[in-house]
Image (cartoon, rainbow, N blue to C red):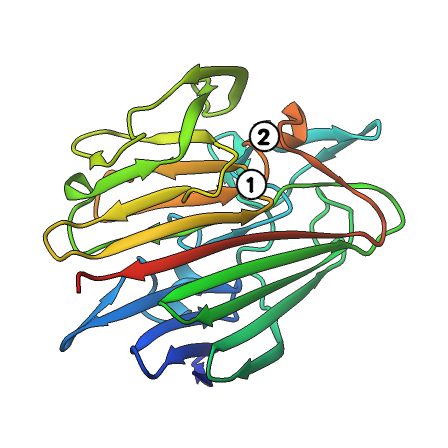
Amino acid sequence: MTYTVFDDKLFPVICLEDEETGCTAEIYSFGALLNSFTIKNGNSTHNVIDGFTNTQDAKDNITNGFKSARLSPFVCRVKSGRYQFNGSPHAINKFFLGKEAIHGVLYDVPFSITQKGADDKNAYVTLAFEYNKINEGYPFPFHTAVTYTLQNNNTLLITTTVTNTGKQDMPLADGWHPYFTLGSKVNELLVQLNTRQLMVFDEYLLPTGDYINYNAFATPRHLGETFLDNCFVLDDSEKPACVLKNEANGLQLTIYAKQGYPYLQVYTPPHRNSIAVENLSGAPDAFNNGIGLIIAKPGEHYTFAAAYTLQLPH
């Protein structure tokens, strides 16, 4: 395994590589986002991340789809950008889509490389950011560290640790927003989801508090023309949260919710060239509805982890 850092105009870029298999992961320190995750098939290389051309592209266009954005300290939407916590009102002052604040406050911040290394089994990097009331709508200081570990068997483990560095409780939800592409339109993919429940959304894509049974993708089936912009409750099991497979080239991506991610948001954008599969610790608008909301205590650490495995036919 190897670890390499190079500069791409604006921000350091980290490449983790398994030299034996050719599997790589490219991480931008900008937003601590995953820009590529590749596997080799003969002379071909498949990148399953719908990413950016370079760090300038990411900086200029991160809010156009929020590709691979870290979602913290809230995920998805906050209704009207407003919430109350411990009796005090707050108004998010970051990015809005329509009337709702979306996708947290860390998606465009520069993370620092704090740890790195490689041996014969792993290559890893840890990126960290110290948030200290830089956004008036979230006046709770915290430290976040994101560790990417490239393991054997073409597996990438992503672990996030959030620490409340303030002196009072703070509301917290964590997640991220990757788009995956397996070499075809998403219509052609076989999809399997480890869920039996879907959250009911209102017209603003905010949970109503109701749930409906959902097993359309309990076993692998083609996505076809199905449109998804939904949050699913994952079954409590060791099964993969999601499996995507392209039968034409045999490429398969298996997603595991390892720790702290009981929800899965899935979105199929209109272009249908990629599909967003988002591990979430809480529901959209958790700051208001409390679904999955973590009340982070001063000095306490909260850890979230997901793993991604690539496979090709033998």
Can residue 129 be seen at all in this image of the molecule?
yes
Q: Position of residue 193 (x, y in %)?
A: 35, 36
Cα distance, mark 2 to mark 1?
A: 7 Å
The reply, left or right, for residue 103 in relation to residue 41 is right
Proximity of marks 2 and 1: CB atoms separated by less than 8 Å? no
Report the residue at 43% width, 77% height from top: 16
Q: Position of residue 254 (x, y in %)?
A: 35, 51
Can residue 10 be seen at all in this image of the molecule?
no
Q: What residue type is labelled 1?
A: Val
Query: Residue 225 is drawn in which quadrant?
Result: top left
The reply, left or right, for residue 42 in relation to residue 275 is left
Report the residue at 80% width, 52% height from top: 300
State the mark number for residue 285: 2
Q: How crowded is mark 2: few (under 14 residues within 10 Å), some or many (20 or more)?
A: many
Residue 123, placed above or below residue 134: below
Image quarter where the C terminus lies is bottom left
Residue 232, placed above or below residue 5: above
Q: Position of residue 274 (x, y in %)?
A: 26, 48
Q: Residues within 10 Å of mark 1 (few under 14, many from 20)?
A: many
Q: Which of marks 2 and 1 is nearer the N terminus?
A: 1
How many numbered dots are placed on residues in this image? Answer: 2
Could you say whether the residue bearing mark 1 is in a helix, strand or loop? loop
Report the residue at 51% width, 67% height from top: 148
Residue that numbered label 1 is attached to: 75
Residue 191 or 127: which is nearer the viewer?
191
Q: Where is residue 222 in the image (x, y as percent from the top left)?
A: 18, 36
Q: Which amino acid does label 2 sit on?
A: Asp
The reply, left or right, for residue 261 in relation to residue 255 is right
Could you say whether the residue bearing mark 2 is in a helix, strand or loop? loop
Residue 29 or 20: which is nearer the viewer?
20
The reply, left or right, for residue 245 in relation to residue 238 is left
Spot the residue most to the right.
Answer: 167
